[in-house]
Structure formats: C-alpha cells, structure tokens
Amino acid sequence: MIETLLTPFQFPFMQNAFWISLIVAPPTALLSCFLVLKGWALMGDAVSHAILPGVVLAYILGLPLIAGAFVAGMACALLTGWLAENSRVKRDTVMGVVFSGFFAVGIILFVAFPSDAHLDHILFGNMLGVGQEDLDTALTISVPVCIVLGLKWRDFLLHAFDPAQAQASGLPVRMLHYGLLTILSLIVVAVLNAVGLILAVALLVTPGAVAFLTVRSFGWMLAVSVAVCLVSMLSGVYLSFFLDSAPAPTIVLVLTALFIAAYLRRRRQIVQASRAV
C-alpha cells in the first residue's frame, strides 16, 4: 500500500513536476492577492494570452522563448494602460480587445510558420516534460519576485486600495503600477511550461480569491494564498498520476474545488450571522 502511494515520487518526470510546483506556487499565490484586490483578474488573463505571438516570433527568430514571452506580455500591459488612459473605453473592455487581438496574431503566426513546437504544450502546459533548464528559469524569476513582493507588500497594498492616498503618501505610484505589470509578465513566463497560457490565469486568480473568502487580514491572506496554491499544485500533480490525467487541468480542478468550499463556508457564516441578529 505504502509503495503504491509513493510510486509517483520514483519517476524523474514526476519529481520535476513536483519541483516546478514548489517553485512557481509562492510567487503566483502572492501576486494573485494583489490582482484580486486591485480588480486585475482579467489583466492576468490578458497577459497570459498575449504572450503567444511573442513566443512564436522568438521561435522563428531563434531567440529564447522566455524573452519573446516577456516582451509580448509587457507590450500588452503597456498598450492596455495607454488605451485606457487615452480613450473613453473602460479598462476591462480595452483588455478584452487587446489580449484577443494579440492571441489571434499568435495563432496566425503559429499556423503561417510551421514548427516543431506543439501548440497544446504552449496553451495548456507540459509539466511532465519540464527539464532542468525550465526549473532554473522558473527559480530565477520566482525568487526575486517573492523577495520584492515580500518587502514591498504594504506599498503595493496601499496602491491597490487607494492610488490617490498612495501618491499623497509619497509613494512612487507609477513605479508601483508598472512594477506590478512587470512582475505579472515575469510570472506568466515562469509558469509557461508548467500550466501553459490558458490555465495560467487560474494560478493568478484562484489562490487569492480563496484566501480573500477565508481570512480578514491581508497578511494572513498572503499566507493562506501561498498554502492553497502549494497544496493545490502538489496534490493536483499527485492525483494526475493515478487518474491518468494531465497535471495542469487537475491542478485547476483542485483550485476550483477549494474556491467552492471557501465560498460555501463564507455563505454559511453570513447566514448564521444574520440569524443571530
């Protein structure tokens, strides 16, 4: 029985899947808290989709895929911000237009220039194909991101709640704004090989949403979000071995189940409080 339960840990490809989960879970979870509070959930979706043309162009030009992904992600974020500030269209509408346009360009380039790269791996990830280079890239991005968010979380928090108050307090508001966009683009690059473009939004939104429904303090929200993301990714990879399913969608299903549980728990607390009154 014990040998059966420990079987997934005996294979190198499963070990790498667990390692990439441990590496990318903390930064995505921390960032998700700020995206949830700031109402930038769609921004995470936009950037994750928008990096496709950058990946394809980088492959065509023989450049590192992560470089193309980062440039495309930043271009999407900056273009979205510029259009939102210089037009009457709301930010969420601009994001929908920009990221769908970027994604369409990526699909056209992928079809127009056939390659050995599999679109499924780009869109949905390939955790079981993660190699040492992917682990090193993810670690190189994740560690600095965790350090920055850990040291500056109060500044980012004030900026998320009240940018005007943050500016009045002397904080570099524009630097915080574009710094958060840069971090978002870097994180999407880090999780590219793990969960792909489409499923990356789940890691960038759901852990923070679960924590938001569970605790009242932002400090605890950060801790709970990291715990939720770690448990979901590790258990998703583990269960996928026995279910013979893809790890990334299994992780998303675990995250969704935790969100539903947190939502039902919160609803029950509200009902009990209303009855007590």
Image: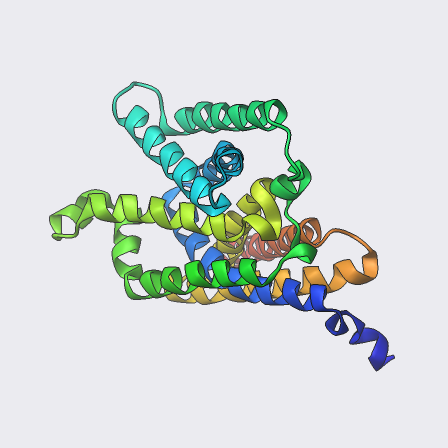
Return the x and y of residue 266 as percentages of the image width and height.
Answer: 55, 55
Residue at 41% x, 65% y: name it: 143
140 and 231: which is toward the camera: 140
Image coords of residue 251 (percent x, y): 66, 55
In the displayed structure, 42 sits above or below 218; it is: above
In the picture, measured across the screen, residue 50 lies left or right of residue 112, that is left
Is residue 112 rendered to the left or right of residue 180? right
Q: In this view, does 136 lie above or below 6?
A: above
Number of numbered markers: 0
Quarter of the image with the N terminus is: bottom right
| Identity of the residue drawn at 50% across and 40% down | 62
Q: Which residue lies furthest to the right in this view?
A: 1
Q: Quadrant of residue 258?
A: bottom right
- In the image, taking residue 248 as reference, residue 172 lies left or right, namely left
Q: Where is residue 35 in the image (x, y as percent from the top left)?
A: 41, 47
Residue drawn at (39%, 39%), measured in percent from left and top?
71
Task: Give the image location of residue 105, x and y in percent.
Answer: 52, 24
User: Does the rendering let one see residue 254?
Assistant: no
Q: Which residue appears farthest toward the front when viewing the image?
A: 62
The relative height of residue 13 versus residue 76 in the rendered view (above or below) is: below
Q: Residue furthest bottom?
A: 2
Residue placed at 45% from the left, 40% from the top?
68
Q: Can residue 200 be seen in this view?
A: yes
